[in-house]
Amino acid sequence: MVSLDALFRPRAVAVIGASRDRRSVGGSILHNLLTFEFQGQVFPVNPKASVVHSLKCYASVEDIPDPVDLAVIAVPKPHVLGVLESCGRKGVGAVVIITAGFKEVGEAGLALEQEVVRLVKRHGMRLVGPNCMGVINMDPAVRLQASFSANEPLPGPVAFSSQSGALGEAILALLRERGLGLSMFVSLGNKADVSGNDLLEYWEQDANTRVILMYLESFGNPERFLEICQRVSKTKPVIAVKSGRTAAGARAAASHTGSLAGADNAVESLFTQAGVIRAAGIEELFIYASAFASQPMPAGTGVAIITNSGGPAILATDACIELGLQIPTLSDETQARIRAAVAPEASVANPVDMIATAAGPQYEAAMRAAAGDASVDAIIAIFTSLEMIDGPSVAHGIIRGAQGCGKPVLVCFMGSVRSREAIDLMRDAGLAVYTFPEDAARALGAMVRHGRWVQRPVGVRRMFEDMDRAGIERLVRSARDEGRIQLTLAEAQGILACAGIPVLPWREVASREEAIAAANALGCPVVAKVSSAAIVHKSEVGGVRLGLESALAAGVAFDQMMVAARRRDPRARLVIQRQVAEGTEVIVGATRDAKFGPLLMFGLGGIFVEIMKDVVFRVHPLSDVDAQDMIRAVKGFPMLDGARGRPKADLAALEAIILRIDCLMATCPDIGELDINPLFAAPAGAATAAADARITLT
């Protein structure tokens, strides 16, 4: 973190490529540093000029007589390596490379970028970029505007990082337009050195930063991102837009950043586990940021809606209920206080509809009364602008009503009659102001979700030292020695058993006689299933027989099933397995994502996974709390929790199995995909166990 002080809190900045032309990148960066009143020294560097912007210009950074902490490099690509060598010899602490044409343009650019990274590491410098627009620190003691942005941000509590320079410029403009103040800004570009993870840790310690915004196109180290965000988001909300949600968007992100975007279900899972508030787009980013940057966190879900128009209040009510918020009936005392201040025709329950004549004093009185109600955790104040009502006076009333209430107040100002002045007044007073009531509800919903995350236990990882790792390795090596990546059913269930995952009693058999003996030993009824590495989908060859009530039936099943199976695989065998009598079918699976590592899945089995796709994903590593959340996040969870008189499943057993699969994927990197389907979730006291499994090696 100390190394980033040279980037954000430099005592001296050199602009290498400084120009007298304000329209050039080097010229605009130098201009911004000067006009923004940077609180340190500024040194232009350009071998073709002696003076730039009334400042002595140096031919090389090494010619500068004083120490330089930060160098901003805006020179043609062929000169970048030479400039970096000079910076290293000078002892510069950090560099920002504005110049483009590196890994984002292909293999040749990637090779050059790798040389850049080797060079800065050799000299102990930190690097932002290349292919970026610069950095900003609004701290009054620093006032660093080391970018070519044409926008002058307002100071405030929001830190923002962007992988896109152009989008970063647009968002800087929108921040000012929405009245949101900035603490720091970084255009990361290609993230050759300084990453979003570095910024999260730096901003975690920054007293001026209250909210962290991120525009992401790719992840460098997802597991590290998870570890950092789980800590940072407990004290500072992290709100992110991740592009590349679709396959086409992922391809576009790859071509833009030079790195592959991850699958969106992995991203969604990562954000959920990390406590990151995901915004669907830039507009939603600002909807959330406005509330988090200005308002206290709500203590609960109760919302009071105060309005001068019934229609917007209905929209706000619907949106709140859909988001899991509550619209409680106000107490008799609260209603009496409001009744004393509003027109006789007003409705004072909740929503509080003060009718069209309501002005500033009515808003102030109603808000103060609602804020004192124990059932109210937040207030949405809605004003539909009318010619006969002075908007700024209403704004002053809302401001007075919000003062000292200690609860979040979100304002919806609709209409255009003197609204701009009123909105500016409220934003200057630290209120979050929206155009539509649904936006205010969405922001409150995000705050409530984040509040639950903050209160969520941290959770612990379990390592399961009782796993038979040698046995797992033997089964994997056996398949590898035969050149196979698909395991047989017997091998897959063997690996589960080695991992400590309960499997219904079973035996693999190679003859009719062995099938009869297995059925007798296991006890009928039994199930017969084909076990073959060459037959992935057993149903294609009639490879499953249920409800075999006798040993003789098992022998007949062997004869019949092996005819079709051995046409496909002469080495096919049969697994005879005890048929389960009770439990709810669930599926537990895992796959190995190229970027995110192991990705775990849980859901209800049968038609719920095949048709309704009622499944939940999480990324490795999982904690015990993550496993609990996975089970409770599926829509069909009530079926496991004893709904309609059903026996309640042993949830602790399910959690342990999910965590064992997570541990198995971490300790056995050969496993590429794993499915347990079905896993029978039995009531407490009975055996929760796997009935079928499929494993594919990497």
Image (tube, rainbow, N blue to C red):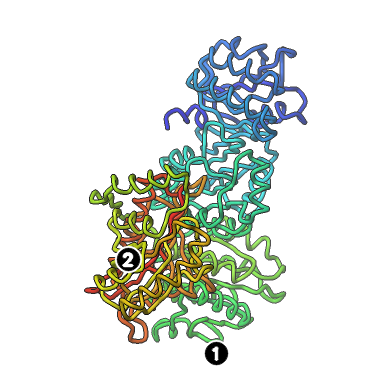
Q: Quadrant of the image for the N terminus?
A: top left
> How many residues crowd mark 2 within 10 Å: few (<14), some (14–19), many (20+)?
many
The kind of residue tagged 1 is: Pro
Structural distance between the alpha carbons of marks 2 and 1: 58 Å
* Badge 2 or badge 1: first in the primary sequence: 1
What residue is pinned by disc 1?
344
What residue is pinned by disc 2?
654
- Is residue 206 positioned above or below 651 on the image? above
Q: Position of residue 202 (x, y in %)?
A: 45, 38
Q: Position of residue 293 (x, y in %)?
A: 50, 54
The kind of residue tagged 2 is: Leu
**Total numbered labels:** 2
- Is residue 311 positioned above or below 26 on the image? below
**Residue depicted at x 66% and y 19%:** 44
Question: Helix or strand or loop: what does disc 2 sit on?
Answer: helix
Q: Nearer the viewer, residue 691 or 269?
A: 691
Question: Helix or strand or loop: what does disc 1 sit on?
Answer: loop
Tell me where residue 255 sits by quadrant.
top right
Say whether marks 2 and 1 touch (CB < 8 Å): no
Q: Nearer the viewer, residue 692 or 314?
A: 692
Q: Is residue 400 visible?
A: no
Q: Is residue 674 visible?
A: yes
Taking the view exactly as shown, the residue that stands out farthest to the bottom is 345
Q: Nearer the viewer, residue 126 or 556?
A: 556
**Residue depicted at x 44% and y 80%:** 328
Q: Is residue 408 left or right of residue 192?
A: left
- Is residue 128 positioned above or below 419 on the image? above
Q: Position of residue 227 (x, y in %)?
A: 40, 46
Tell me where residue 42 sits by quadrant.
top right
> How many residues crowd mark 1 within 10 Å: few (<14), some (14–19), many (20+)?
few
